[in-house]
Amino acid sequence: MLILLAILFPICSGIALWYYHKRTGKKGHGLYTAAILITDALALLAILFAGPVTLFTFSPRVTFSFELDVIGKWFLVIAVIVYTCILFYSFVYMKIQERESSFLAFYFVSLGAMIGVCCASNMVTIYFAFELTTFSTVPLVLHDQTKEAVAAGLKFLFYSIGGALLGLFGVFFLYTYAGNEVSFVPGGVLDMTRTAGHEPVLYLAIFLAIIGYGTKAGMFPMHGWLPTAHPIAPAPASALLSGIITKSGVLVIIRFIYFSIGPGFIRGSWTQYAWLALALITVLMGSMMAFQEEIFKKRLAYSSISQISYVMFGLALLSQGGLEGGLLQVMQHAPSKACLFMCAGAFIYRYGIHDVKGLRGIGKKMPIVLWCLTIAAMSLVGIPPMGGFISKWDLVLASLSSDMGVVSVLGPVVLLISALLTAGYLFPIMIDGFFPGDHVSDELAAQPDPKMETGSSEAVPRMMWIPLIFLCAVSLFIGLFGNRLLALFGGIV
Amino acid sequence: MTTFLSEQLFIGGLHFTADGFRIVYGLIAVWMWALTTLFSFEYFRHERAHLKRYWFFTAATFIATEGVMFSADLMTSFVFFEILSLTSFVWVIHEETPEAVRAAKTYFFIAVIGGLILFMGLALMANTAGTLYYSELHEAIANSGQPKTVFAAGICILFGFGAKAGMFPLHIWLPKSHPVAPSPASALLSGILTKVGIFGILMTALPGFLGDGTFGLIVLLLGTITMALGALIALFSVNLKRTLACSSMSQIGFILVGIGTAVLVSALSGSGEESGALASEAMELAHSGLVLHMVNHSLIKLTLFMAAGVFVMRLHMINLNDIRGFGRGKPLLMIPFLLGALGISGVPCFNGYISKTLLHEGLVLAREAFAEGGAVSTASLLHGIEWIFLISGGCTFAYMLKLFICIFIEKHPQKQAEYDAATPCMNRLSAETLLTSSLLMPLLGLPAISGRLAALMTGDDVFHHFHAFAFANLKGGMMSLLIGMLVYLVIIRRFLIVQGRYVNRWPAKLDLEDLIYRPLLLKVLPKAGGALARFVDGLPGYARIIMPAAHFISRFMALLPDGIMIFSRRTFLHERKRQSEEIAPGQLRTIREREKQAAIPVVINFSFAIMMMCLGILIIFGVILLLSL
């Protein structure tokens, strides 16, 4: 029951608060704060005490049920942390946007949907929750309701639905060839007597499902929605999409491959190699595009494409090490990238700067924000002691120790080239921001010193940078202790 | 004596250990930070901007340096190495002038690239050898069973650490970033941060790759190039700090030559009696020589860069033509500079002489060992390297002579009176600091002290059979100095001084960074890679074709019955053509439009339907018939 409560509470409270604020015309954040804290508490309780729960049964094989295992808990923790941080940030940010309460309503609904994705215990349930995340985040993308925003929102919607349908194809095949019980079991539930002789069509179906669920994770060839949706959406929504919603795709793929199909089934098949190839192509392509992009949020969107495909690469290795590396990458990318998008949002909020060139000298106005940007960037590049370092280390080691000939060396090389490009597109912002010399950008040159205006050396309110610091701390924590946490995941592969 | 910080952290915890070498270097780091700090008080008196930032990152770099110096495994070294790269970057960019920013970016990205290569090396090493402990490396490498991969790992580690050491071809940041950093920071960058890189190479190569002749040869060749190239650029340079920076690069080359010799010759130590004995002796000499040279270079560069700091502090200029003659009549500045210059040039009785002679003897013995063992080509290669070694040593003497004569002997054509009046040129604290730092040169020039130090650092005492002032050794040193004198008189005085001004005849275009790296990384890569990435990025966009295609197909399907109908009417239903107009065959659309307007008689459609039904029944019967057969 705790799980159901944790899922339904944010959904209901989001809608209720929207209605309440609409009726009374009040503008306060107290109730939202209370709602998110209660959700956090419920999620924590669910992690600690919840048992399996079945909501209803369509047929003996198709049920609607929830259960939290260690993977689900891992994703749930990171989702809740990032959601909470972004919420506090968006209290400030949404001052420059209209219709705050409707934004927050969908925000809470998507939180509930995300918790549902984390807790689902079979493919049907997770598919429902997965679709709900799509439908509840589309309004966040088109929140501005300008022509471009609506177009971007629709693009996101079409990509997601198209991808989910491809994924659904895989679910049908799963149910055709699985044993009697179809829930998540490490190692998969395929019935080998049924699959015998049908491998080619199953490989194809699995491959299509990977591409389909990979849409959310921004994997080539279905990555197109990210660079369109991110720059248009309000910064908290971009942070959310990139930080958490993309991870829902990752989680569904883990559930599908590792817990339903079973990694052993596709190990060594063309599906695995095609998946690896797609992941590596995406890694390179994303970071290369980001390297050339001048609009900061678009650069970050391409960066997300590349970074999440690190996870995909790890998963595609189909080994324990690869899975662990991927999970660590999820855990470090979510806070780091959310932090970066929130930094980008802070620049937009205060000075309206969208372009990277406009950020020369920003370090004199927003030192703390730029420090957070630097730390998050360090994590993405993989510089110790940040989280990105150990995730990359695990991925590279997993790849090297895998037995796949040229791929096992090519993978690390691609990851490292991508890391170099990541340094190339993130660190110059920091260098120019902190050390502008005499060339402060035109946008900033005319701005007064924040000390004169607000009395603090930071040009944005406290509520905006405290979440950033918290997210950086999470990434640092992962860097320091992440490898210990991996002991949790023994025996999945 | 390994200690863990915590096994919970990172990947199996941070590991530290302390042996003779590490303790000596840890103390040298303390010494260097202490003296530069004392010197900084006056240096920064007039430039107070960003001082807080400077001190913070100086302290952070100190901690990271000690972290590397006491690390017991490659992973710990790597962690602190990366931290150190980022924190020391702030020194380079401190002044925020355009040159400083450019140099700092170069420094930063070389550090990132080096870090990534190192990362790859570590991963390969951990994967094949299974350990990253320096102490277990040798055995693990020998037993790995994958010699090629381990070798690749070694090369990656070499280049990764080499990037920080200033090894060719990743040396490009060195001559650019040292001159723009504040002088106390330059002293640290040059004196100790390059040694951090050397530390990594040394700990990996000795004893990890002992016995791997190819690895040794690669280190030796890269070291030789670094040594010669650094000396050559230093010879041409007309900027005081740049000369010193290039000199650092050259001295790093000497150290690498020592490492290379030791590893190369160790391949022989198991073989025949005569050559084996020679080889192990050569190895010990090279090892002692290189650690002593590391120490000496750190201490010398500390003095020299602080002395250069006096010019920056007083004149804000470091071009030789501007500061010419400033040192006249300033013994407090001259004595430290002179001691440093004598030390680095390898003049007997000063510290550089001993370490260079050891390195040289190591090379000579290695050549003899190879000649004894019958490897003639290696022996002749070593002979060539020995000459390059002597010439580079000579160049060291030549450029230090050039600096000394320019600053302390020659007169400035216009401002000499002004310069003579600028005394004292520094306050008492700075002068004492400078003097203290320089007094170590003659002290370490005593073989007794150097010998003890080397024994402490390497564990084997070579000085019982090595006599620093034996004739054969003095001959090598003297030859080098003679070459240096000739170079100064012939090349510098003839070609590099034009009408009384020092000129840099080094072609400005001949710069690896501007010639290759920057265009490659900033132009070619984004252009080629970017075009490719854009193509790949746009590839799914071609899926747009699906929509028109689907539209076309569904249209076609929709029109198909109509088409059949019209076709049948015109064939076996015998539609009578209207005489007034001709219908070209195949104009489906026109016909269809007309049919619509002309209100097709129901009968025709009806008969068509009946016909189709009959057709269907016939087909069904046919199928049944076929099946029943």
Image (spheres, rainbow, N blue to C red):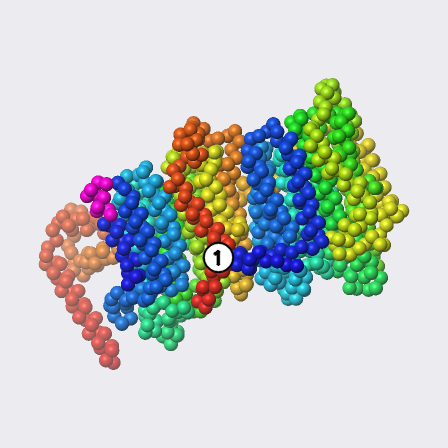
Residue A50 on the magenta segment: no
Instruction: Label 1, secondary structure: give it.
Output: helix
Work out which quarter of the rendered image holds the N terminus of chain A and state it.
bottom left
- Using the rendered image of the protein, determine whether residue A290 is visible from the camera's viewpoint: yes
A243 and A221: which one is in front?
A243
Is A25 within the magenta? yes
Image label count: 1
Q: Is residue A346 above or below residue B543?
A: above
| Residue at 12%, 53% in the rendered image | B600
**Would you say A415 lies left or right of B367 here?**
left
Left or right? Give the position of B22 relative to A190. Answer: right
| Image spot of residue B542 (x, y percent) | 38, 50
**Foreground pick, A474 / A216:** A474
In the image, what residue occupies the spot 20% across and 56% down?
B562
Crowding near pointer 1: few (<14 within 10 Å), some, many (20+)? many
Which kind of residue does numbered mark 1 sit on?
Gly
The image shows residue A169 at horizontal and vertical percentages of 32, 63
The span picked out in magenta is: A17-26
- Is residue B122 at least partly visible in the picture? no
Answer with the quarter of the image where residue A351 lies: top left
